[in-house]
Image (cartoon, helix red, strand yellow):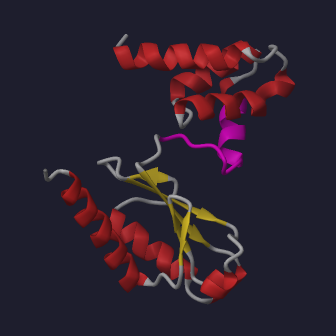
Amino acid sequence: MTTQDIGIERKLQRALRRFSRQKRNLIPVLQAVQEKLGYLPRAAITAIAAYLNVPEVDVYGVVTFYNQFRLSPPGRHAVRVCLGTACHMKGGYITLDAWQRRLGVEKGQATPDGEFDLDTVACVGCCVMAPVTIIDNKPLARVDPTRVDGILLSYKLAKEGEGKP
């Protein structure tokens, strides 16, 4: 077992101890574990199933049904594309496609370097700014495919600037 695995196991056990072993605690347990780990790795799903004495497939079914749960580690920067009515009408799906192509990931995934993760949201309430992309909880207005390139360039330049003395 690696040091990282031991750390995950400790966090997992701390989260599980807060709950009784009743099946009705499944969603709160999943939320607590994800809060500690940032996502729900396979080992966590297995441990939760054993702790609550429910089949793993049932735990996995809940995790994949609710979009609040993640099966992969989050990126350093969270990119959320709004697909509410106004954003949809103004090209939200085109914006999502641009993010997917530029980052090389599908929604719900993180880039291989761990820099960004991509997902969608139903509505952020900034309809007048449609289509909206949220990065690290900051809404960006009228994000079309051209803006996606500019936004990524600004993050790249900022990262390069961090490495310089």
Quadrant for the N terminus in the image: top left
Residue reaching furthest to the front: 165
**What's the residue at 63%, 28% (across, down)?**
33
Image coordinates for residue 91, horizontal then vertical, percent: 55, 86
Q: Is residue 100 left or right of residue 141?
A: left
In the depicted structure, whether residue 8 falls above or below residue 113: above
Image coordinates for residue 38, horizontal then vertical, percent: 53, 37
Q: Nearer the viewer, residue 136 or 19?
A: 136
Q: Is residue 117 left or right of residue 24?
A: left
Image coordinates for residue 81, horizontal then vertical, percent: 55, 69
What's the magenta region? 58-72
Quarter of the image where one finds residue 48: top right
Quarter of the image where one finds residue 56: top right
- Magenta span has 71? yes
**What's the residue at 83%, 22% (across, down)?**
23
Image coordinates for residue 120, horizontal then vertical, percent: 59, 64
Q: Is residue 78 left or right of residue 65?
A: left
In the depicted structure, whether residue 67 falls above or below residue 27: below
**What's the residue at 34%, 14% (across, down)?**
2
**What's the residue at 50%, 58% (across, down)?**
136
Q: Nearer the viewer, residue 102 or 152?
A: 152
